[in-house]
Image: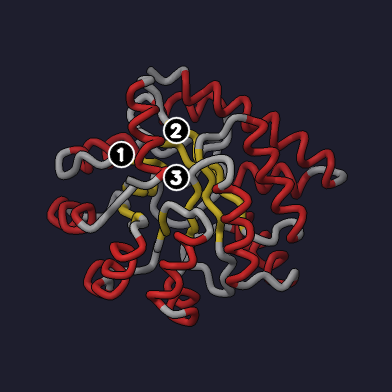
Amino acid sequence: MTALDQLFVKVRAENRAALIAYIPAGFPSQAGCHRVIAAFIAGGVDAIEIGYPYSDPVMDGPTIQAAAVTSLENGTGAQEVLAALKVASASVPAVVMTYWNPIERFGVTGFAAAIAENGGSGVITPDLTIEESTGWIDATDDSAINPIYVVAPSTKDARLAQVTSKCGGFVYAASLMGVTGARATVSSGAADLVARVRKVTDLPIAVGLGVSTREQAKGVAAYADGVIVGSAFIKAMQDAPSEEAGLVAVTELARELAKGVREGR
């Protein structure tokens, strides 16, 4: 059982959802990313998702894309991602979100092993299909980490059953079709998607793509096991007059969102 698995056992016993915070490795700088992780933890997040910046992100909206550009300009590669993961996993369960190409480039077996060696609980692979996952599933099994897949409102019921049967840790439910980003409202399709996923798996379900306020976190926590927030934290850093001010804003936002996930039920 990974630290992530244990977290979901704990929050289910507390009858609440988990707050999962996302930050790309190397943003706003290598050291700055580690400071953002500390701000997340000070604000009370339950788990952290470290993004592996990629030059052609199919799932990321403009906020995360801009952060990824900054991260890549800061020289972020596998070692920097693993370093950020190690910092995060020292305090809370942590996973990496990455497109498939960097895993393949690193080496499938080696990447899974490196995640485990740096305290990671699993990897989210938004562009990897289960048909192409045989070697990856074997590697995650060998390293005892969770392979986490993404489902969307467009995913058919039969497909949901197939995908979730290969998942570990949690199922990532994309609340809106399309790309990530903080939004004024979270898609009503999210609740429908979670209900459909619940029919085919007992795994925890975490909802991402769009949550940015305490009220939204509360709304999603009413039906989901996890609330994933990324763009709102990145925007808080991008909009701040200084890194220090940004870190204060991130901590405050995390505190508000942590209250929200506890108010959902």
Pick whichever of labels 3 and 2 is earlier in the sequence.
2
Q: Residue at x 49, y 58 (%)?
A: 96
- The quadrant holding residue 75 is bottom right
Pick whichever of labels 2 and 1 is earlier in the sequence.
2
From the viewer's perspective, is 137 left or right of 245? left
Q: Mark 3 and mark 1 in contact (Cβ < 8 Å)?
A: no
From the image, state whether disc 1 or disc 3 is nearer to you. Answer: 1
- Give the residue furthest to the right: 241
Secondary element at tag 2: strand
User: Could you say where residue 156 lies in the image, as x and y percent from the top left?
Assistant: 18, 54
Q: Residue at x 77, y 34 (%)?
A: 248
Q: Residue at x 40, y 63 (%)?
A: 125
From the viewer's perspective, is 150 left or right of 214? left
Secondary element at tag 3: strand
Disc 3 residue type?
Answer: Gly
User: Could you say where residue 218 lies in the image, as x and y percent from the top left?
Assistant: 47, 24
Disc 1 residue type?
Answer: Pro
Per the rendering, the mark at residue 204 is 1
From the viewer's perspective, is 92 left or right of 148? right
Residue 66 visible in the shown view? yes
Q: Residue at x 24, y 73 (%)?
A: 134
Per the rendering, the mark at residue 208 is 3
Disc 2 residue type?
Answer: Ala
Inter-mark Cα distance, 1 to 3: 13 Å
**Residue of label 2:** 18
- Give the residue furthest to the left: 158
Q: Is residue 133 above or below residue 248?
A: below
